[in-house]
Image (cartoon, grey):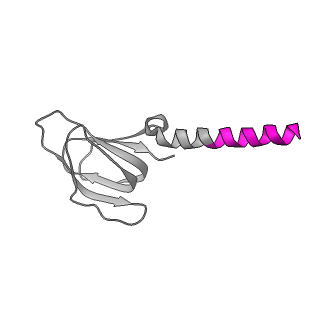
Amino acid sequence: MAINFFNDIMKFLSGVFKKTHERDFGLQGGTYIGTFDVIYTGRWQAIKANGNAGDPALRFTLLTTAAGDDMTGFRLNPGDILYGDFTEIRIDSLGAYAYFKN
């Protein structure tokens, strides 16, 4: 009886840790996207635009999601973060950091 209870507690705590770990996108590392007109492929859960206030918005010349959504043309202001499940990224200016999906 005690062993089953212990196993149930361990499964529960493991699930809590997994859910928390998935939300902490910075813990997974990522890819710096700084080369324009290059298609980056992978799996990312967030994209942060580089730059300072007053810089022009980052424009995606290709941005697709795992579900097949085409977000090409989307603009992201410097310092802003876009959350999703992205598989292909190409930019036209500035730079961005894409955080890996768990």
Horizontal and vertical percent position of residue 38: 29, 52
Q: Main secondary structure of the magenta part?
A: helix
Asked if the stretch drawn in magenta spans residue 6, the answer is: yes
Residue 59 location, x and y as percent?
20, 51
Which of the 4 quarters of the picture holds residue 74? Answer: bottom left
At 42% from the left and 49% from the top, the residue drawn is: 44
Residue 39 visible in this rendered orientation of the protein: no
In this rendering, position of residue 23 left or right of residue 35: right
Give residue 66's position: percent from left, percent from top.
43, 61
| Residue located 33% across and 45% down the image | 47
Quadrant position of the N terminus in the picture: top right
Look at the picture and state if 86 lies above or below 102. Answer: below
Q: Nearer the viewer, residue 69 or 38?
A: 69
Specify whether 34 is left or right of 67. left
Residue 15: give x, y in percent of width and height: 63, 44
Tell which residue pokes out farthest to the right in this image.
Answer: 1
Say if the magenta span includes residue 50: no
Could you tell me which residue is drawn at 80 percent across and 37 percent down?
A: 6
State whether residue 72 appears in this view.
yes
Q: Which residues are magenta?
A: 1-15
Rendered residue at 25%/61% (across/down) = 72
